[in-house]
């Protein structure tokens, strides 16, 4: 593999409790064990010196990390870094979008599993759909490329596809539907909620959505466009046979542990 992409976790804490991600009661890392802002910046600098061109700041929820503005300001000044990106639940994005853009953030992935308020609250554990949608709007206004990540879940998958597709009629974002992945802590949830993306992908193609060719450095997502829609639709299918073929990334946890695979604990 040629590694050009680093995912840098800055905290394990999050203000949401998404059913497929976190338990209601969580034990978080002691703050003294988490990498400091200085250590995060040094780590990022060393990786860019080794050829990393893209860094994505992740969590937990990175925007609740104390000093995260200083971190982004420092990352944005790294020589050789082409892309600075963020993954967030979006609930704090509206008040920070301008600062993130000024620091050099050009791409943000926002986790948003439903546009229906009650379902959003059920899945995320927080009644903050409007705050997230405000974050989407603020990022667009600041010129940040927005991708919305929605985990496909039984029994809501049909409604998710319907609602988000209608939203994309006039919304200039990419919504990427992600197949639920099985983890050691959520085996029962996976068994009851996993749904394959394949039939939904086929249905959209039958409706006139066309797959875009993947770029040389593109990730695993299949992206589709339609002449009648401003936004795009993507699918991330981790159980497809070619999912790992284009992997160009490493992950560093908030503890400073290096993972060669996003889904490996080794």
Image (cartoon, rainbow, N blue to C red):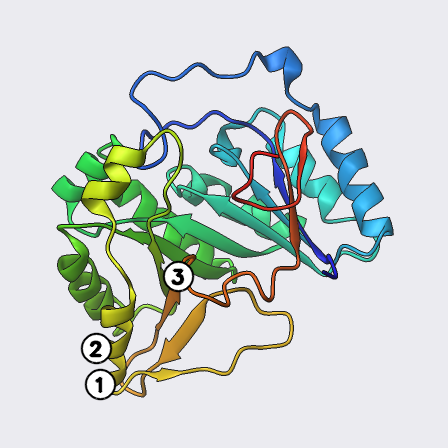
Q: Which mark is residue 240?
A: none
Identify which residue is drawn at 52% across, 35% down.
59
Dot 2 or dot 3: first in sequence order is: 2
Residue 31 in the image, given as x and y percentages of width and height: 59, 14
Establish if 134 lies above or below 107. Answer: above
Quarter where residue 159 is shown: bottom left
Q: Quadrant of residue 253?
A: top right
The spot of residue 94 in percent (x, y) is 42, 44
On the image, the x and y values in percent for residue 53 come to 74, 58
Mark 2: few/some/many CA within 10 Å (<14, 14-19, 20+): few
The residue located at (33%, 16%) in the rendering is: 25
Say which of marks 3 and 1 sits in front.
Answer: 3
Q: From the top left corner, tell me how far across and down residue 112 is, in percent.
A: 32, 49
Circle 3 sits on which residue?
Answer: 237
From what the image shows, is residue 82 above or below residue 71? below
Residue drawn at 81 percent across, 35 percent down: 42
In depth, the one of 8 and 94 nearer the eye is 8
- Where is the N terminus found, in terms of image quarters? bottom right
- Label 1: which residue? 206
Secondary structure state at the residue bearing disc 1: helix
Disc 3 secondary structure class: loop
Seen in the image, is 183 located left or right of residue 243?
Answer: left
Q: Are the residues flagged by discs 2 and 1 in contact, CB closer than 8 Å?
A: yes
Element type at mark 2: helix
Which residue is pictured at 23% across the width and 63% down the height? 164
As drawn, is 145 to the left or to the right of 153?
right
Residue 128 in sight from this viewpoint: no
Q: CA distance from mark 3 to mark 1?
A: 19 Å
Mark toward the start of the polypeptide (3 vs 1): 1
Q: CA distance from mark 2 to mark 1?
A: 5 Å
Q: Nearer the viewer, residue 38 or 224?
A: 224
Circle number at residue 203 = 2
């Amino acid at each position: 593999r040629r590694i050009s992409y680093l995912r840098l976790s800055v905290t394990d804490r999050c203000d949401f409790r998404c059913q497929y991600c976190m338990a209601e009661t969580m034990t978080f890392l002691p703050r003294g064990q988490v990498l400091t802002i200085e250590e995060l910046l040094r780590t990022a600098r060393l990786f860019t010196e080794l050829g990393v061109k893209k860094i994505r700041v992740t969590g937990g929820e990175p925007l609740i990390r104390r000093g995260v503005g200083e971190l982004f300001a420092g990352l944005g000044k790294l020589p050789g870094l082409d892309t600075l990106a963020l993954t967030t639940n979006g609930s704090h994005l509206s008040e920070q979008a301008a600062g993130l853009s000024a620091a050099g953030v050009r791409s943000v992935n926002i986790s948003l599993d439903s546009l229906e308020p009650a379902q959003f609250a059920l899945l995320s554990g927080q009644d903050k759909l409007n705050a997230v949608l405000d974050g989407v709007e603020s990022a667009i206004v600041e010129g940040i490329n927005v991708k919305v990540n929605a985990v496909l879940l039984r029994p809501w998958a049909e409604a998710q596809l319907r609602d988000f597709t209608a939203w994309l009629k006039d919304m200039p974002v990419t919504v990427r539907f992600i197949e639920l992945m099985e983890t050691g802590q959520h085996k029962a949830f996976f068994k009851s909620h996993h749904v394959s993306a394949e039939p939904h992908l086929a249905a959209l193609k039958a409706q006139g959505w066309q797959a875009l060719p993947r770029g040389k450095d593109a990730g695993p997502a299949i992206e589709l466009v339609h002449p009648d829609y401003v936004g795009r639709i993507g699918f991330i299918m981790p159980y497809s046979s070619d999912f790992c073929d284009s992997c160009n990334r490493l992950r560093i946890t908030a503890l400073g542990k290096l993972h060669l695979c996003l889904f490996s604990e080794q």
